[in-house]
Image (cartoon, coloured by chain):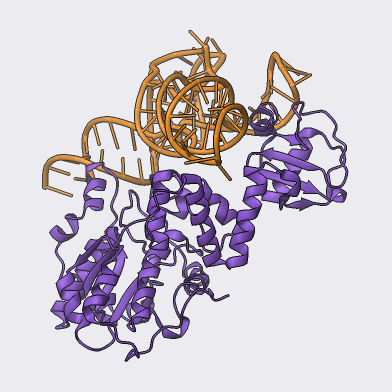
RNA sequence: GGGCAGAUACCAGAGCGGUCAAAUGGGGCAGACUGUAAAUCUGCUGGCGUGAGCCUACGAAGGUUCGAAUCCUUCUCUGCCCA
């Protein structure tokens, strides 16, 4: 479903031309670093659409808000009439970007990568204008290279350059292995820029080194060098580590509206300001009560990736459920009474509900110690603290499993 | 290829023959308080069992022993030094 918020992308030459100076100002906003603004301005003055490269490694099938920061920037270039080039690193994904990594990535099979790439691009088009985006796969050139080609490419980069990288160095210092193939990654990413003839490459701040290698290789090939545009890394929901699926601290672009809203409500105040800036491109209004500001953030983002109605609905439901603590009127997962286990005790019932409604597998010990004994499990507001007590249910009953999990029986 | 060191639960890291399902810290989960924020406090953090207890676990496989995370052998992996 295309995001309805998007205005149509301007064609080149744009009917309402934006001056290079004005473009520069808009483009630099929100970025962490641009190398260099002067160079970018020069390119903007070329009076042709620039080729803007954004490389993504389809190592996971879903994109999350961390990825959208760079995609938003690419979209902005599109809106100014430039050519977005979305590079799918189907080849490099099988290696794994060592950037910011404290350990070698587990390798992915080609099938996994291709499957990921498909869902990945679909989600990326929630942000980018599909018609105006050139999608390329780096396997198209890397799979054709011979070992000789690889060696020639490698001859252009020194080990010293590679070892300057902080992530490699820290791994070396901390006695963590660095595999030789990981050294290839920046070279390959750099070569992508040559193939694409990129004018600008967008990436996270951890991509500085890789993107600079691209500049070096372009120079060697006699091409104009790409401008480096770095976007800040988005912290995950914990506010500390970068947003990543492997840390389970992400908000997925495809998350259901309610879940997306809820995840955003759990962020800290500091993080909220950051999300405002990086995800909405807005500045947090300090006069707002933090809770109001957060609801507003959550609503806007939910509306963006679903639609206005869903954003409003998620917010309304939030208010009834958590602000008014009115579970009865809330939109809860519904479980049919007919599918309950035969002997419904508090224990078996809560296990069943976690599994059926939230796909969570909880051991009996965990249920007893974490959920039942402390009074987390409640039927229509009454605490059920005896795991073996039988439970009789009727339609409309609401079982609360924890602060965040509740179901309604039908 | 040779020498040395190491491999402990989600992570870091104690333990070095029984009192070890394994100290401590972090993380995580649940509860109280709140704004599903922060801070703070409490409990939990291998599985089954109401419980006694049982089972599975300290890189892998064997062995010594009444008894092994702890000792021995081989293997695998990692790091460091030498070549």
Q: Relative to residue A402, is residue A333 depicted above or below?
A: below
Q: Which image quadrant is residue A374 in?
A: top right
Q: Is residue A91 visible?
A: yes
Q: Quadrant of residue B47?
A: top right
Locate residue A144: give its quadrant: bottom left
Counting from the top left corner in percent of width and height, residue A184 is at 27, 65
Q: In the image, what residue occupies the spot 71% across and 34% down?
A: A377
Chain letter, purple in picture: A
Measured as percent of width and height from the top left, residue A148 is found at 23, 77
The chain shown in orange is which? B
Q: Nearer the viewer, residue A105 or A9?
A: A9
Apparent side of residue A217 relative to residue A322 in the rendered image (left or right):
left
- The residue located at (21%, 75%) in the rendering is A226
Viewport quadrant of the N terminus of chain A:
bottom right
Q: Is residue A262 left or right of residue A227?
A: right
The residue nearer to you, when weighing A244 against A376, is: A376
Q: Position of residue A19 (x, y in %)?
A: 24, 82
Residue placed farthest to the front in the image? A287
Is A254 rendered above or below residue B16?
A: below
Can residue A143 be spotted in the picture? no
């Amino acid at each position: 479903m295309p995001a309805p918020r998007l205005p149509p992308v301007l064609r080149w030459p744009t009917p309402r031309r934006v001056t290079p100076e004005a473009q520069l100002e808009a483009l630099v906003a929100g970025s962490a670093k641009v190398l260099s603004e002067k160079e970018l301005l020069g390119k903007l003055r070329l009076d042709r659409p620039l080729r803007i490269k954004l490389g993504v490694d389809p190592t996971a099938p879903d994109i999350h808000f961390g990825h959208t920061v760079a995609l938003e920037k690419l979209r902005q270039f599109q809106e100014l009439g430039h050519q977005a080039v979305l590079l799918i690193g189907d080849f490099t994904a099988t290696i794994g970007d060592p950037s910011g990594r404290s350990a070698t990535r587990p390798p992915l099979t080609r099938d996994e990568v291709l499957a990921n790439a498909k869902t990945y691009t679909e989600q990326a088009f929630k942000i980018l204008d599909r018609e105006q985006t050139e999608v390329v796969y780096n396997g198209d050139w890397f799979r054709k290279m011979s070992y000789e080609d690889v060696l020639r490419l490698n001859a252009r980069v020194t080990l010293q350059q590679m070892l300057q990288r902080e992530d490699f160095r820290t791994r070396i210092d901390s006695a963590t292995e660095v595999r030789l193939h990981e050294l290839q990654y920046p070279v390959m990413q750099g070569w992508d820029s040559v193939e694409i003839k990129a004018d600008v490459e967008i990436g996270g701040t951890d991509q500085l080194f890789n993107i600079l290698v691209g500049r070096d290789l372009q120079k060697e090939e006699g091409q104009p060098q790409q401008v480096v545009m770095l976007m800040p890394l988005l912290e995950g929901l914990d506010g500390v580590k970068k947003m990543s699926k492997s840390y389970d601290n992400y908000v997925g672009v495809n998350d259901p509206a309610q879940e997306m809203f809820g995840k955003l409500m759990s962020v800290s105040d500091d993080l909220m300001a950051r999300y405002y800036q990086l995800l909405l491109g807005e500045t947090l209004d300090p006069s707002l009560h933090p809770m109001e500001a957060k609801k507003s953030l959550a609503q806007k983002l939910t509306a963006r990736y679903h639609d206005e109605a869903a954003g409003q609905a998620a917010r309304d439901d939030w208010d009834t459920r958590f602000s008014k603590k009115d579970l009865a009127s809330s939109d809860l997962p519904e479980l049919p009474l007919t599918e309950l286990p035969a002997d419904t005790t508090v224990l078996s019932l809560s296990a069943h509900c976690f599994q059926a409604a939230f796909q969570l597998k909880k051991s009996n010990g965990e249920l007893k110690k974490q959920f039942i004994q402390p009074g987390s499990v409640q039927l229509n507001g009454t605490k059920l603290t005896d795991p073996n007590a039988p439970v009789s249910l009727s339609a409309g009953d609401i079982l609360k499993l924890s602060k965040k999990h509740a179901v309604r029986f039908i």
